[in-house]
Image (cartoon, rainbow, N blue to C red):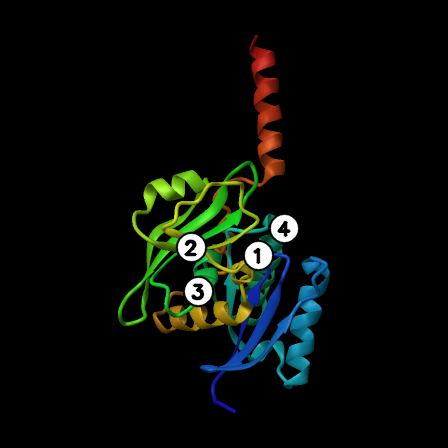
Amino acid sequence: MTDGPYNLAIETSSRHGSVTLGRGDTVVESVDLPEQRRHAVDLLPAIDDVCRRHGVTPAQIGEVYVSVGPGSFTGLRIGVTTAKVMGLTVGARLVAVPTLDAVARNAPADRTRVAVMLNAKRGQCFTGVYDRGDDGAWSTRIEPSLLTPGELCERVDGEVALIADKLPEHDWPARVTLLDRVLATPRSAVVWALGRAAAANDAYVDAVQLTPMYVRLPEAEEVWRAKESAGSQDADS
């Protein structure tokens, strides 16, 4: 077994949650959460189980890499809160990993430009676009943002491979290749790899400052604000 402190990756941004336990630069084990999307119930037991199987105590986990979105608002809160608690209680150092970055790394090795689109409802998608250089290194062409399929086509010229799940209806041009939907599932093993690379560059986040990357407000909060605004306008009229 590789020497060094243990580390943990958490992915709860979609219904297919997972955790990965590592030690140094070696993956020890990856575990999928049940697919009932009960991350609030299943995440901590999954972490506890994988740690117990390998004789790891919470105090031995030196770093936590957490997928911070965009994605499921509830799932992100659960994953980020768990990472924050580990940072504040056992002193684990935290790394925030953008979820779209992790999904882009699922692309086949022959793809050099990849767009990721995850359905955000209302005809929009959480979207990011990435280029892979000749050396295999990735760069971000479009930062995570809310785009429609039409807006993506307007902003990206040339051929692009699209990793997407549950897209709105759209007449895609021939230059856009839709890849298998299974690739749109973020995986904790990829979050772990990206977290290790970021940690090597000292890209840690303070536990108090760590927050999910929502891109837009949760729907419930948007509804509440709309009602508050309507009430304020009625009072002024």
Binning the other alpha carbons within 10 Å of mark 2 as few (below 14), some (14 to 19) or many (20 upward) gives some
Label 3 and label 1: CA atoms lie apart by 18 Å
Label 1 and label 4: CA atoms lie apart by 8 Å
Q: Which residue is mark 4?
A: 74
At mark 3, the secondary structure is loop
Whether residue 93 is visible = no
From the viewer's perspective, is residue 27 above or below residue 99? below
The amino acid sitting under disc 1 is: Ser
Label 1 and label 2: CA atoms lie apart by 25 Å
Question: Which percent across, then down, holds residue 89?
Answer: 59, 67
Whether residue 120 is visible = yes
Marked residue nearer the N-terminal end (3 or 1):
1
Disc number at residue 177?
2
Marked residue nearer the N-terminal end (1 or 4):
1
The amino acid sitting under disc 2 is: Thr
From the viewer's perspective, is residue 151 above or below residue 200? above
Q: Nearer the viewer, mark 3 or mark 4?
A: 3
